[in-house]
Amino acid sequence: MSMIFGVPLAVLSGQLLIGIINGAFYALLSLGLAVIFGLLKIINFAHGAMYMLGAMATVLMFDYLGVNYWAALLLAPLLVGAFGVAIEYFLLRRIAGQDHIYSLLLTFGVALIISGVLVNWFGVSGLRYTMPDVFKGGVNLGFMFMPYYRAWVIVAALVVCFATWFVIEKTKLGAYLRAGTEDSELMQGFGINVPLLISLTYGFGVALAAFAGVLAAPIYSVTPVMGSATLITVFAVVVIGGMGSIGGAIITGILMGVIEGLTKTFYPPASSAVIFLVMVLVLMFRPSGLFGKEA
Amino acid sequence: MTMMKKLLTSAVASAMMASGAQAAISNDTVKIGYLADMSGTYRDLAGPNGLKALEMAIADFGGQVNGAKIEVVSADDRNSPDTSSSTVRRWVENEDVDLVAGMVASSVSIAVSKILEENDRLGIISGSAASSITNEHCTPNHIHYVYDTYPLANGTASAVVKEGGKTWYMLTADYAFGHALEGDVTRVVEANGGEIVGAVRHPFPTQDFSSFILQAQASGADVIGLANAGADTTNAITTASEFGVTQSGQTLAALLLFLTDVHALGAETAQGIQLTTGWYWDMNDDTREWSDRFMEETGVRPTMVHAGIYSSAMQYLKAVEATGSDDAQTVRKQMMDTPINDMFAKNGKIRVDGRMVHDMYLAEVKTPAESKNEWDLYKILRTIPAEESYRPLSESKCKLVNN
């Protein structure tokens, strides 16, 4: 068997593929953060909690209402998105225009409250969610066993990422959005309801996190604390990609998944640190991020 | 100086007992501090329900012992030795706490036991895993009650090797507890003629195990050993099942698995996994009766830690009752002299190093067809006798043992 740095080629190809799958998760999550920061200049520390809420909603809707996976894929982001709109309307709007640190602290507090309350109700051991039958099993690719569900994760995440990028960068709605956040008074003069646009944007950003949560529910243990660790990594991804760069967030997400995957093969103890190492390097040599516009 | 003081105190206490005089319970109050992870990763296995178990024991005593009131205070240890140390210092120095119970993260227990030794108070550790707690970290002021890494490795690893799982690949949590467990497993596997063919140390915590599972699959080992705990273990097991580890002929051996973890995984995912446990709720009439009471209070079935908290509190309160004292050394000696026979253990015995030795059980997770309800999860394959389970005193590095 051919080897690369003492690792069989087959194993390496498997790890690359796994990296891309995890990268798809990072892309989806960092995309939501990038949309919210890029358009609203809000540093959304509640993003991990929204991801968790998406996963929790999937499990709870199934347990109590019998809502299946496909319906949850639509309903959970809608519910969490609506919750996000409420947060924007009742809380974030009141500190609009203040320093970034205010929205950071506010959303951080909201996240702590949400996960604290849910820990009290559901504990931390995790809720059980059975994989939909259609995804059970997998296919042997020769170099690795590929579960059907992971293949689905790549497809679903990439489609949603691309659609989001397309809407924001290439459509009229996206143009309104970008213009509304650039000069809201002028846009209001044109008859556009900018506050509504802002609420919806925040709602959409967190709905993306909830969508990632639904994708995660069958493969990771669903607990009220699952979001906190992920959040920090995803923030690093956004920083590397360039705060607010939508396309950058997607590409960087996948890239970081691959780098992390390779680290897990060559030197596992560093795998939780490698993304932050990249972040440090990027901040040193390209402070506005790989895809960010120079400030 | 402290040793002298301890000797004197116990001498005085025994003299008072001998003369039939009522020994003193300080402040006419027996005060128990319950310290555990109330909100983090280790919450469910002890946590708020462990406090309920403690309160059940106190209620069974009628809320008092020898006319002295029994009080409880509790705190969240936040899995931090620093936070825990300052809490316990306040408890023993300012609030006259006589006993600290609960304690989960091994690092917390080791830090707290040092403070208890300085202040000559008693601690009963029910949740921690590290066997070093009664080995190099032993003190005359604490008791380790429910289980430790030594029998976990002895029970599960030797059973799996004997069934033909000769080659092992270890997935180890990269911190003290994981390293300790990996060490204990390696010893047992090699002693039984097996071999460790590879290991990967994963960061704590890890959510996505797919990469590590893939490496374990590629190693071709018979057994994938999980030397981790809590969400790390459940995530690894879920991923292993998704990637078809068991279908490809490899066995999973989870070294530390609590009932709450298995409940979270469900019989579908966890079926067939072998594990070692210090107790299970559905073993006999005594365990079932107590578990029914516990379930009425909490809505869930108890873990071995919950049961151990109740049992050890009863053993403590009985010792206070018998000696009429809440002095740490007097009570500890009485606890050691009285065998433990209750819903938790048969002929359990607290050794001089503070280790409570009792029978352990090798269990297997039932299949969905065998499991009659959501908590009907284990079948007990074998009782591992106490003397076979724990590290023998002849191998002990504890300063209280004369080797």
Image (cartoon, coloured by chain):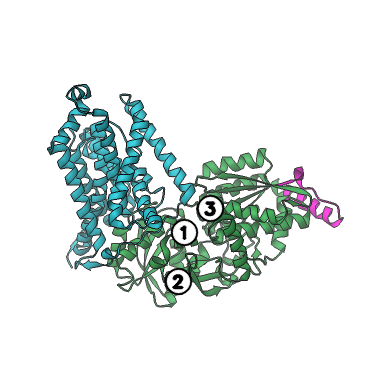
Chain colours: A cyan, B green
- Counting labels gives 3
Q: Are marks 3 and 1 on the same chain?
A: yes
Instruction: Determine contact: label 3, label 2, CB under 8 Å.
Output: no
Write down the region rendered in magenta. B5-30
Residue at 15% of width from left, 42% of height from top? A166
Residue B343 horizontal/vertical position (percent): 63, 66
Q: Tell me which numbered mark, 3 or 2, is placed earlier along the sequence.
A: 3
Q: Secondary structure at mark 3?
A: loop
Membership of B29 in magenta stretch:
yes
| Alpha-carbon span between mark 3 and mark 1 | 16 Å
Q: Are marks 3 and 1 in contact (CB under 8 Å)?
A: no
Mark 2, residue position: B366
Which of the image's four quarters has the C terminus of chain B?
bottom right
Residue sitting nearer the eye, A77 or A278: A77
Given the image, what chain letter belongs to the residue carrying mark 3? B
User: Callout 1: few (<14), some (14-19), or many (20+) C-alpha neighbours within 10 Å?
Assistant: some
The subunit letter for the residue under badge 1 reads: B
Which of the marked residues, 1 or 2, is nearer the chain's N terminus? 1
Task: Say yes or no: labels 3 and 2 on the same chain.
Answer: yes
Residue B180 - label? 1
Q: Is residue B231 visible?
A: yes
Is residue A111 magenta-colored?
no
Q: CA distance from mark 1 to mark 2?
A: 29 Å
Q: Amino acid at mark 3?
A: Val
x, y percent for residue A102: 36, 28
Q: Is residue A292 left or right of residue B225?
A: left
Q: Residue at (22%, 24%) from the top-left corner?
A: A184
Would you say residue A239 is visible in this rendering? no
Name the residue that disc number 3 marks. Answer: B104
